[in-house]
Amino acid sequence: MRFYRDLGLTEFYRRPVDPALLVRMPAQPEPIQEPMSSGELQSSNPEDSPIAPRKPIFAPPQAAAAVPASGRVAALQMIRDDLGDCTRCALHTGRNKLVFADGDPNAQLMFVGEGPGADEDAQGLPFVGKAGQLLNNMITAMGLKREQVYIANVVKCRPPGNRTPEPDEANTCSPFLFRQIDVVRPRVLVALGATAATYLLGARQPLAGLRGRVHPFRGTQLIVTYHPAYLLRDPRQKKEAWADLQIAMKELGLKPPAKS
Ligand code: SF4
């Protein structure tokens, strides 16, 4: 099946999930407010440490009350209306289209990425370029359709040159993401890459220490994996990403579709 070949899973996808990967974290990690030394952020994997040191990462706000399924479309529209033609951070200056989200407001599975790229900025939709195609393949490999999940980013406007969002930009935009998460309230939330994991958890931590576990988070189960753009640069990590997605599937009670 093409999806599995694209993910590098031709021999891998039937492998059962290691029970050790399903261990839940006892508690959400404490936010790190103190600056970290650059040495703490060093890693052989660049996905582990893209956030500039010595700038504070805000702790997530308290989760809002659950919204009934019948009210989620309107609640998300209210968030979009609150954003308006947003100029709250510097990223608005280079924006073509603000990228709010895509997908089912009642999704059981939500993905959070870093921010829009050129294709997303042009179309106003998240994950529609090459990385988006890989994400679509990952979703299909899980036995789902893109329309069945909800996809958003930490920042809703494209950083210049696709750079990592600055902490003040991400801290300004992420409250809207938290409101979206609280409305959709998926059973499983997948953070795609270190930037998403950092601003969701409110703490800088190497990706390696966050992957392979379920983190109870705002009424959902958070799973951290690599960003599809990183997987395009280093396809050897696709098997690792698939192991993370299998944890998500276990939480959702999903089995991979049969190979055709
Ligand atoms: Fe507003 Fe977010 Fe865009 Fe910044 S990135 S201008 S906070 S919508």
Image: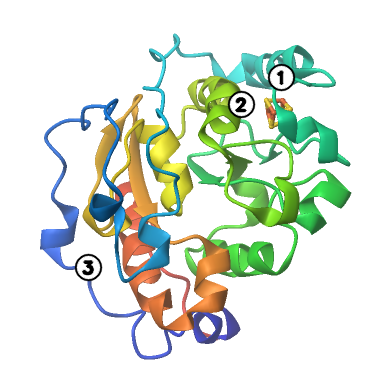
Is residue 29 among what the camera can see?
Answer: yes
Residue 115 in percent (x, y) is at 64, 45
Residue 231 in percent (x, y) is at 50, 72
Are the residues at dot 3 and dot 2 in contact (C-beta closer than 8 Å)? Answer: no
Q: CA distance from mark 1 to mark 2?
A: 8 Å
Are the residues at dot 1 and dot 2 in contact (C-beta closer than 8 Å)? Answer: yes
Q: Which residue in the structure is indicated by mark 3?
A: 17
SS category of the residue bearing label 1 = loop
Mark toward the viewer: 1 or 2: 1
Mark toward the viewer: 3 or 2: 2
Mark 3 or mark 2, earlier in chain: 3
Characterize the local packing of mark 1: few (<14), some (14-19) or many (20 or more) Cα atoms within 10 angstroms: few
Front residue of 106/23: it is 23
SS category of the residue bearing label 2 = helix
Residue 88: mark: 1
Q: Quadrant of the N terminus?
A: bottom right
Query: Ligand 1 near label 2 (Cβ, under 8 Å)?
Result: yes
